[in-house]
Image (spheres, rainbow, N blue to C red):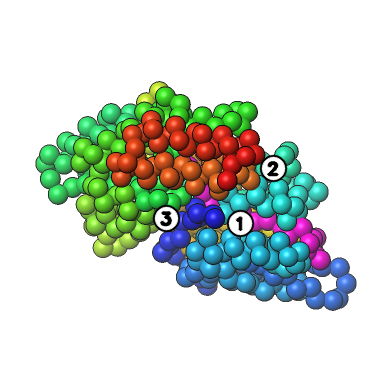
């Protein structure tokens, strides 16, 4: 089972679809499919609302540039789990479609290991403008299998009217939150995702990295019960037990954290970039009072868990060259910039952050600073099973069934078995 790691959100368009149609006309290659026969590509993707609108407009412009290629958009379930299962069924059957696929950032190694998707090195893509963390997440055994489409990184939101400068350490974060709570006891000090799902794992990775921990070492061996990870989980657990975070966070996901922060009820919150434009909307209770930074450090390094979406190509597609043309167009700087203006999806390449984009959506400037600390989760086809064990450890800790050390010791044994090939 794969957990929901691509955050589904109510993104806000910041410009008009009419402008998108006009502006995209100059994007991408003008190379047409060979011959006069029309080729039909099936593009399987997630996205509703403004995301779907941006995708449809981009595809329309691609078809104008490539009149002999027709793109049929297959809309996958908004649930990452359901979308994944649909793709697994299609790819495992050997189907030639979908030709191009939107992939959660943690799926490419699994798809590549199963030989379901095509290595893209043959097309000689220039990856120099893409964020390195996202590029790394699309590699498997020395080959590139995925091109980043848009980036997501989890960071720390804070109320600039309550906290003048972002905390540099976790100790300072707690102190700043408690100072604000002392003035207004109704405030939540730290809102975070603590339910038993992938979102809790990314929060733990953020804090773990700040304390100097990681999930796997450089040799791919688990180090879940390291002293650094135990300190990180102890800090999160203490946040709940001490009242810095409400007990309710043990059942919270992104939407719950969003509600707590946008209502003005939280000093700090962990969440993804989509929250920023919502916070700055007209009428927002926290408009002009929001900062977004990587989580603090306490002996480690700033860590912002990497999310987002890639584009991959079905290994069995009948039209690899045309599929690559579509991927190349959708991941061009101009197309990414216009997608950001419509859907709020942050571009996955640095040259897409144009002065025009930053003028119309200034929050991208703060978000861009966090991308430098983007940290992929373990890039391995085993990750979904590893994540499930970490989720169990976090849940057992937050519910009081096990101490952080006991929970991580159990997770360590389970993941060691998985990595060695004997795990269930």
SS at mark 1 in the image: strand
Q: Is there CB contact under 8 Å for labels 2 and 1?
A: no
Q: Is residue 317 magenta?
A: yes
Q: Residue at x 43, y 45 (%)?
A: 392
Please identify the residue farthest to the bottom as the structure is shown. Answer: 37
> Residue 284: percent from the left, percent from the top?
27, 59
In three-dimensional space, the C-alpha distance between marks 2 and 3, rounded to whole angstroms, equals 29 Å
11 relative position to 44: left or right: left
In three-dimensional space, the C-alpha distance between marks 2 and 1, rounded to whole angstroms, equals 14 Å
SS at mark 3 in the image: loop
Most foreground residue, 216 or 339: 216
Instruction: Say whether disc 3 or disc 1 marks the residue closer to the N-terminus.
Output: 1
Most foreground residue, 412 or 349: 412
Q: Is there CB contact under 8 Å for labels 3 and 1?
A: no
Q: Is residue 197 magenta?
A: no
**Is residue 165 in view?**
no
Instruction: Say whether disc 2 or disc 1 marks the residue closer to the N-terminus.
Output: 1
> Residue 334: percent from the left, percent from the top?
60, 57
Residue 274 image label: 3
Task: Provide the residue designation for mark 1.
Answer: 103
In three-dimensional space, the C-alpha distance between marks 3 and 1, rounded to whole angstroms, equals 18 Å
Instruction: Say whether disc 2 or disc 3 marks the residue closer to the N-terminus.
Output: 2
Task: Provide the residue designation for mark 2.
Answer: 140
Q: Residue at x 68, y 56 (%)?
A: 312
Q: Which residues are magenta?
A: 304-322
């Amino acid at each position: 089972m794969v957990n929901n790691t691509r955050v589904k959100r109510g993104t806000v368009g910041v410009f008009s679809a009419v402008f998108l149609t006009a502006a995209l006309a100059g994007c991408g290659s003008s190379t047409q499919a060979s011959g006069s026969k029309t080729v039909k590509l099936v593009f399987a993707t997630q996205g509703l609302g403004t995301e779907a609108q941006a995708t449809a407009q981009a595809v329309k412009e691609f078809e104008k540039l490539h009149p002999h290629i027709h793109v049929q958009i297959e809309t996958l379930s908004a649930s990452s789990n359901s979308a994944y299962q649909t793709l697994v069924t299609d790819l495992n059957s050997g189907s030639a479609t979908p030709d191009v696929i939107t992939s959660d950032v943690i799926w490419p190694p699994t798809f590549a290991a199963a030989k379901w998707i095509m290595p893209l090195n043959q097309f000689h893509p220039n990856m120099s403008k893409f964020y390195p963390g996202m590029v790394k997440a699309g590699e498997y055994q020395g080959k590139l299998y995925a091109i980043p489409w848009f980036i997501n990184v989890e960071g720390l939101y804070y109320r600039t009217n309550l906290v003048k400068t972002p905390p540099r350490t976790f100790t300072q974060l707690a102190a700043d939150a408690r100072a604000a709570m002392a003035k207004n006891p109704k405030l939540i000090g730290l809102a975070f995702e603590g339910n038993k799902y992938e979102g809790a794992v990314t929060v733990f990775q953020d804090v773990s990295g700040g304390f100097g921990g990681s999930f796997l070492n450089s040799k791919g061996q688990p180090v879940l019960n390291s002293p650094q990870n135990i300190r990180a989980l102890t800090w999160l657990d203490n946040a709940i037990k001490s009242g810095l975070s409400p007990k309710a966070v043990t059942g919270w996901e992104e939407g719950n954290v969003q509600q707590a922060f946008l209502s003005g009820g939280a000093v700090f919150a962990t969440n993804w970039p989509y929250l920023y434009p919502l916070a700055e909307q007209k009428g927002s209770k926290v408009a002009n009072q929001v900062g977004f930074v990587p989580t603090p450090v306490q002996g480690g390094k700033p860590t912002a868990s990497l999310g987002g979406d890639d584009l991959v190509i079905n290994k069995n597609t009948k039209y690899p060259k045309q599929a690559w043309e579509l991927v190349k167009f959708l991941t061009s700087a101009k197309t990414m910039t216009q997608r950001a203006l419509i859907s709020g999806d942050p571009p996955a390449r640095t040259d897409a952050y144009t002065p025009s984009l930053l003028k119309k959506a200034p929050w991208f400037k703060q978000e861009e600073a966090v991308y430098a600390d983007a940290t992929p989760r373990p890039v391995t086809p085993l990750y979904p099973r590893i994540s499930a064990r970490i989720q169990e450890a976090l849940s057992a800790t937050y519910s009081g069934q096990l101490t952080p050390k006991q929970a991580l010791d159990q997770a360590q044994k389970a993941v060691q078995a998985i990595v060695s090939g004997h795990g269930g």
